[in-house]
């Protein structure tokens, strides 16, 4: 009898506890939903004047990186099942004639996601007095807009109004990384496009090539990246070409001393001097790295109508390839080993050796490529999910460079 009563009591108590847990779960879910809705509304309603004033103070405008739970793996499986295959095929075909498509797309992704999230706001052209992110100083040398436009046109022919420009950019950048010898990483899709650009945010938000380490780490931390993730993400500098104007001061007049940067390896210094003869020292320091994507050559061989004003043809500028040991030569490993030897091309890269924590990760990635590839893949997934827009927010543009 006592055993029976104890069993009844235990069953009754468990039912009460289960119901209590159920109520708590509902309350937590409602609280999170309200918080997320409030954050989304605040972001969507923020006027341009507020955006500029916040950025002029600190790099703390950005909340934590976006919640990727609203995205789905193979989001277009029913609405446009060939979407990812179209992106993959076009990038691979283009890579055979324009191998520097990989760093160009990778850089486009970073410059888009680092400013207000992965919403394709970077791709919008200026119109009717409304400025474009493309015209902000850190973005003036970006290439590859024509590539995204060509892919979008192909997708519009196959599935009109379905695939967002934001998804095209993250998928295209992933394919470029793989073709350049980097790791494959899975991506969820379902992003939506922004209805506006954020040119003022770009000016303050993109770290410069001559930035100090503390500023670089602060910029990445404000977007939710740890020191380890920052070091791994900068491994993307394994590919591309850096023009001399972005590091020439390190060779001849480091920080106004009229002497080279003492952290540069002497042999590497002479190699760089042979590439950069100190003939052009007038380039604006706020400009960024330029990857040599021929502006007149789009995917289909015709001129790109988008951003044509800033992509006029010009003589080839001298520079240094990041992968100077040859394409696909251990993506990432050479970059980190170069930093250990004082052979970092950019001052901001070499600065990773200025702090014990970041230096320890440089050493780890230099000695273990498998570790780097794993961490880089994970961090690229995180970058690609940064503050995404999903339905009902945002829209799907029919043309990546225009709202109409």
Image (cartoon, rainbow, N blue to C red):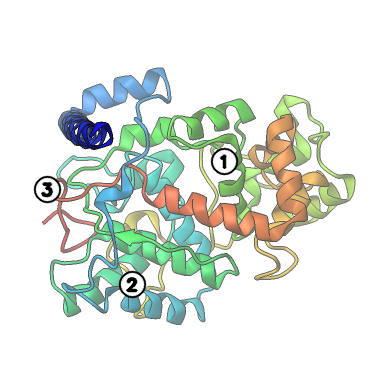
Q: Between residues 186 and 339, which one lies in front from this camera angle?
A: 186
Left or right: 91, with 29 as reference point:
right
The residue that disc 1 covers is: 230
**Percent x, y for residue 95?**
49, 76
Q: Is residue 238 above or below residue 341?
A: below
**Percent x, y for residue 359?**
73, 37
In the rendered image, the quadrant that contains the C terminus is bottom left
Q: Residues within 10 Å of mark 3 (few under 14, many from 20)?
A: few
Helix, strand or loop for disc 1: helix
Residue located farthest toward the front when viewing the structure as drawn: 1
Q: Residues within 10 Å of mark 1 (few under 14, many from 20)?
A: many
Q: Which mark is residue 55?
A: none
Q: Quadrant of residue 358?
A: top right
Q: Upstream in the sequence, badge 3 or badge 2?
A: 2
Q: Upstream in the sequence, badge 3 or badge 1?
A: 1
Is any part of residue 294 visible from this angle?
A: no
* Residue depicted at x 19% and y 30%: 20
Q: Between residues 28 and 199, which one lies in front from this camera angle?
A: 28
Pointer 3 with pointer 2, Cβ within 8 A: no
Q: Quadrant of residue 202?
A: top left
Q: CA distance from mark 3 to mark 1?
A: 32 Å
Q: CA distance from mark 3 to mark 2?
A: 35 Å
**Percent x, y for residue 186?**
42, 63
Helix, strand or loop for disc 3: loop
The residue that disc 3 covers is: 392
**Percent x, y for residue 403?**
15, 53
Q: Upstream in the sequence, badge 1 or badge 2?
A: 1
Mark nearest the camera among 1 and 2 is 1
Is any part of residue 214 visible from this angle?
A: yes
Q: Residues within 10 Å of mark 2 (few under 14, many from 20)?
A: few
Q: Is residue 147 above or below residue 401?
A: below
The residue that disc 2 covers is: 303
């Amino acid at each position: 009898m006592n055993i029976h009563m104890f069993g009844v009591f235990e069953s009754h108590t468990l039912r009460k506890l289960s119901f209590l847990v159920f109520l708590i779960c509902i309350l937590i879910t409602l609280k999170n939903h309200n918080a997320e809705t409030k954050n989304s509304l605040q972001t969507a309603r923020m006027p341009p004047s507020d955006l500029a004033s916040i950025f002029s103070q600190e790099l703390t405008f950005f909340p934590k990186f976006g919640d990727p739970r609203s995205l789905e793996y193979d989001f277009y499986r029913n609405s446009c099942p060939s979407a990812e295959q179209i992106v993959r095929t076009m990038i691979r075909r283009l890579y055979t004639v324009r191998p520097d498509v990989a760093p160009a797309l990778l850089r486009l992704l970073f410059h888009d996601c680092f400013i207000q999230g992965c919403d394709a706001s970077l791709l919008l052209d200026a119109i009717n007095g409304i400025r474009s992110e493309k015209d902000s100083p850190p973005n003036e040398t970006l290439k590859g807009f024509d590539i995204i436009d060509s892919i979008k046109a192909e997708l519009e022919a196959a599935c009109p109004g379905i695939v967002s420009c934001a998804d095209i950019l993250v998928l295209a950048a992933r394919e470029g990384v793989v073709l350049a010898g980097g790791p494959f990483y899975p991506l969820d899709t379902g992003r939506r496009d922004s209805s506006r650009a954020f040119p003022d945010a770009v000016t303050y938000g993109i770290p410069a090539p001559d930035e100090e380490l503390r500023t670089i780490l602060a910029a990445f931390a404000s977007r939710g990246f740890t020191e380890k993730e920052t070091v791994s993400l900068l491994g993307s500098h394994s590919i591309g070409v850096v023009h001399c104007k972005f590091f020439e001061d390190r060779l001849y007049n480091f920080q106004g001393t009229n002497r080279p940067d003492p952290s540069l390896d002497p042999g590497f210094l002479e190699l760089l001097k042979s590439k950069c003869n100190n003939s052009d020292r007038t380039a604006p320091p706020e400009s960024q790295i330029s990857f040599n994507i021929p502006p007149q050559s789009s995917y289909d061989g015709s001129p790109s109508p988008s951003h044509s004003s800033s992509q006029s043809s010009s003589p080839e500028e001298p520079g240094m390839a990041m992968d100077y040991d040859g394409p696909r030569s251990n993506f990432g490993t050479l970059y980190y080993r170069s930093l250990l030897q004082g052979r970092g091309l950019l001052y901001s890269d070499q600065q990773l050796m200025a702090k014990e924590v970041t230096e320890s990760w440089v050493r780890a990635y230099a000695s273990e490529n498998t570790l780097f590839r794993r961490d880089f893949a994970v961090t690229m997934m995180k970058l690609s999910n940064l503050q995404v827009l999903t339905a009902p927010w945002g829209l799907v543009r029919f043309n990546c460079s225009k709202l109409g």
